[in-house]
Image: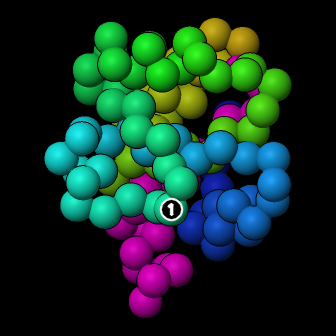
Amino acid sequence: MNHLSAKEFYEKMTLDNHILLDVRTPAEYQQGHLKNAILADINTPADFMSVIETLDKDKHYLIYCRSGARSTSACMYMEKLGFKNVYNLRGGILEWTFEIEK
């Protein structure tokens, strides 16, 4: 797993071969999310797995949550399932808001 700063995460988002995963709750997602992010609520394992099982393990995944803890867990779990290219937004959407949207 790669932990990326908000700037590094943003740079990866400009590439064509990435998929954004928001692992927060539906309520958090509704309050605002990064454009084109897929919701995969890690707090509800059945919902999380239903999304993860549909994904191509060879693609690149940019994963974020509020502060970086849930997305770290999601990255570790996805790696155990055989995903090769998972990137965690260090500091989560809080860091993104501070660094990118300021």
Q: Quadrant of the C terminus?
A: bottom left
Question: Label 1, on which residue?
Answer: 35
- Residue 97 belongs to the span the image colors magenta: yes
- Residue 3 belongs to the span the image colors magenta: no
Quick one: which residue is furthest to the bottom in this view? Answer: 102
Instruction: Return the residue nearer the eye: 82 or 73.
Output: 82
Q: Which quarter of the picture shows residue 23?
A: top left
Q: Is residue 80 above or below residue 90?
A: above
Percent coordinates x, y for residue 21 in the rendering: 52, 41
Percent coordinates x, y for residue 16 in the rendering: 81, 54
Q: Which residues are magenta?
A: 83-102
Percent coordinates x, y for residue 52 in the rendering: 53, 20
Q: Is residue 48 above or below residue 101?
A: above
Identify the residue shown where x is 64% and y is 22%: 55
Identify the residue shown where x is 75% and y is 39%: 60
> In the rendered structure, which amino acid carries the disc numbered 1?
Lys
Q: Is residue 76 above or below residue 16?
A: above
Q: Is residue 53 above or below residue 64?
A: above
